[in-house]
Amino acid sequence: MQPKVEVRTSAGRFTLQLDAKKAPLTVQNFMSYVDAGHYNGTVFHQVFDGFIVLGGGFDSQFIERATQPPVRNEAHNKVKNLRGTIAMARQPNSIDSATSQFFINMADNASLDFAGFEPDQYGYCVFGEVVSGMDVIDRIAKAEIHKTELFDNVPTQPVVIEAMRTVK
């Protein structure tokens, strides 16, 4: 199964095509959050124009959502972090620490690709790509940003994920 997910945000809609062949555990993990409604009401809490937009973990009040146990990092599938791909976020010092947070690559980010078996080389698992609505992601990446107590590069106007749903 290669699910497609429509993401409705306060900035517009985009569609993801997930790759369960190359990242089966990651797609299953992501879809369990989609099916549970976990992402509804979360925000893109950090944006780095020309690098990534990051979301899936916090609501608009920056309250962290409860997560399932971490998923095995499948970055060794060697799928590249290219512009428009979606990958799981994780702790830099812990290979298998991804839960619900994800990012969309705004550029070809070779520094995020699998390069070895140490935590700083393992990379970030790409599990799909944006197949429509990349203009929405570009708008999100160019949002006016500010620094908060928790994070740098936070959109001044929250970009809310209103809903995610599987599409045919």
Image (spheres, helix red, strand yellow):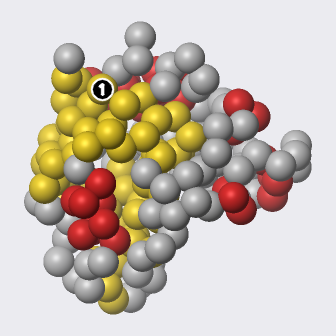
Residue drawn at 39 percent across, 72 percent down:
47
Q: Residue furthest right?
A: 117
- From the viewer's perspective, tell me whether residue 22 is left or right of residue 86: right
Number of other residues with Cα within 10 Å of mark 1, as a class: few under 14, some 14 to 19, many 20 or more: many
Give the answer, above or below, for where 4 lies relative to 99. Answer: above
What is the secondary structure assignment of the residue under circle 1?
Answer: strand
Instruction: Identify the residue at image location x=51%, y=40%.
Output: 99
Q: Could one spot residue 111 in this view of the protein?
A: yes
**Rendering quarter of residue 135:** bottom left
| Total numbered labels | 1
Residue at the disc numbered 1: 4
Q: Residue at x 43, y 51 (%)?
A: 84
Identified at 30% across, 60% down, the residue is 137
Say which quadrant the N terminus sits in. top left
Q: For the residue marked with disc 1, what is the amino acid?
A: Lys
Left/right placement of residue 66 relative to residue 25 reads left
In the image as oriented, which residue stretches furthest toward the bottom?
Answer: 146
Q: Percent x, y for residue 42? A: 25, 53
Q: Position of residue 93 (x, y in %)?
A: 75, 57
Residue 77 position in % (x across, y down): 71, 31
Residue 142 is left or right of residue 25, and the answer is left
Is residue 61 visible to the viewer in this orientation of the structure? no
